Image (cartoon, rainbow, N blue to C red):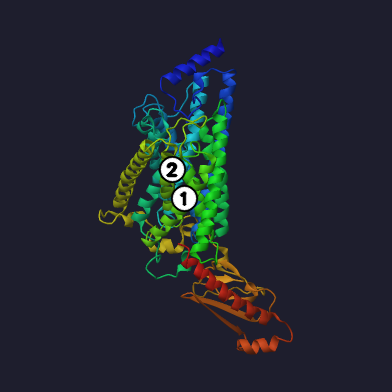
Amino acid sequence: PSYCQAWEECAKHYQDGSSAHGRNLFGDIFDEPYEGESRGHADDATWILTSSFVIFTMQSGFGLLEAGSCSPGFEVNIMMKNIVDVVFTSLTYYLVGYGISFGQPSTPFMGKGSFPADGGYGEVESGLLYSQYIFQLSFAATSTTIVSGAVAMRLKFFIYVLYSLLAVIFYSFVAHWTFDESGFLKQMGAHDFAGGASVHVFGGTNGLVATLFLGPRLGRFDGTRPIYDFLPSSPTSQCLGLLCLWWGWIGFNCGSSFGITDDRWVVAIRCAVTTINATVGGGIASIIYTLWRTKGKLVIPEHVVNGILGSLVAITPACASVHTYDAFPIGAMGALLGLGINTFVCHCRIDDPVGAVGVHAGSGTWGLLSVGLFADSELPGIRVMDGLFRGGGFKLLGLQGLTILCTVGWALMWSIGFFYFVGTILSRDWKDPRKGLRLSPEEEEQGADSYLHGIIDLQDDVDSNDGDNITPSDEFSGNVCGRERSLNRKTEMYASNLCRGHSDDLKEIINVENGDTKVNITSDDGDDAEDLERKNSQASPAPVMAKRRSQRDSKSFNRTSMRGALLF
């Protein structure tokens, strides 16, 4: 009796229109009842929770990627923004966002129930609601955090907190249109399996608007600062961030099957294979791209990282509806489009430090269109029209284009209104909202880690081997002992700290001006470099080694300058 009662309750809930194919625990299981219905729900819920946990690790990936892409002095600030993303997105999505996306009753425009997202006392109903809520929350947080990289080093911290609080509300409308069975785009037949529109196109468009309102970083395009000042501070961090995102993306796409019972396990596994195959295509394309840009001399990490991310974004809406071999061209084209758009954005003097516009808005747009080209209705476990290349004509392709237009238009409407309204209030000047949005020049130069979070860089004072403190000198960035590093401002370095093994009386000052490295080597008694080398050549080879290393560092720094020039 309890089994029959639970089944009838779920069937009634489904018939009332509370489910969305592929976005909750119901799916199409009501066509044919199966044994162990309660256990089936438990298995599906476990799959959803596991996928949600994996997706939330993407916040770490975004943080590492963005911190590595920015200049020193903002790393902690970037990580703090990713933290507040989760905090305030969760608050808003629980109170109103989930109800707008999936609440019942609903209209084609929005849901009108579940404010807040509480399942009450019903065992099955509450379990289904909570499973769907936690998974969709991970999507909402991902969409919001895309903007944090685009506005890095310029947007005031508490304005970003306000953005995180409000952006999820407008995200929820797009999620309703594309995910919920009653959404108008879903009803028309548009297909977005894992959030290409609501997460990536929406987030990337918001990032573009925010970047335009804020303007570029100081000296980015006006020639007042050298190009190497804007190189990523840590390519290692970028690569680690990519690996975290790569791992999380599998949960992102596979978890969108919303279960593993019936034929949904087939959909989940197919999503895993298409996701990996897309990154293969994107990785190969991005390596070819970076070799082409550098004439075969360099494999620039930023190109490879953003290329693979572009391929992941591109396969997101299509991962369940295309064949595994279709994922290769989809991923390759997503990588090339993302990198190409970022290059164009940079040439337009739009400062996007992490490449969010090209990767998310550009590659996401291609991913949605690829559904209209490659989708196959005969694949098991998925309901979708045939794409153009499968003999389905232009209908699905047109619906995918409509989805893009609706998402971009909605994002432009809300983000322009938000940044203009908030900027105008804070600046008290309706003609110059930028003044109220971005950091002051002094704050930007100092770095948010210092003035906002109280982080002190202990390397501002570097001790030499003999214990003497280093006195300040001019600000510079350099390449020391063959490794690319950003050296702290106003610092002099003894050669004993730069190249181990030489005498303590050797002092080396590196000054970098307009891309040229000048190395002056003097001793404390006034001897020039040649005299010092001649005096110490019999006792130790260290001075000679230091000079050779300095010459090597100069060549390496020129290589770094070339890398910066070819970065975009």
**Amino acid type, label 1:** Met
Image quadrant assignment for residue 44? top right
Instruction: Residue 84: give x, y in percent of width and height.
Output: 47, 45
Q: Nearer the viewer, residue 63 or 115?
A: 63
Q: Percent x, y for residue 236?
A: 58, 58
Q: Residues within 10 Å of mark 2 (few under 14, many from 20)?
A: many
The x and y percentages for residue 560 are 53, 69
Q: Please tell me whether mark 2 sits on a helix, a strand or a loop.
A: helix
Residue found at the far top of this picture: 1
Q: Residues within 10 Å of mark 1 (few under 14, many from 20)?
A: many
Residue at 53% x, 20% y: name it: 123
Q: Quadrant of the C terminus?
A: bottom left
Residue in the image at 69% along x and 80% along y? 542
Residue 54 visible in the displayed image: no
The reply to whether discs 1 and 2 touch (Cβ–Cβ < 8 Å) is: yes
Amino acid identity at mark 2: Ser
Identify the residue position indicated by label 1 in the image: 333
Secondary structure found at label 1: helix
Q: Compare residues 301 and 487 and report the one nearer the observer.
A: 301
Above or below, 336 against 556 in this view is: above
Judge by depth and name the residue closer to the eye, 385 or 129: 385
Q: Is residue 35 left or right of residue 81?
A: right
Q: What quarter of the picture does the N terminus occupy?
A: top right
> Is residue 371 toward the left or the right of residue 427 in the image?
right
Measure the C-alpha gap from mark 1 to mark 2. 10 Å
- Sequence-first tag of 1 and 2: 1
Query: Is 341 above or below relative to 46?
Result: below
Q: How many marks?
A: 2
View extreme (right): residue: 539
- Against 24, residue 424 (above or below) is below
Q: Position of residue 446 (x, y in %)?
A: 45, 63
Q: Which mark is residue 370?
A: 2
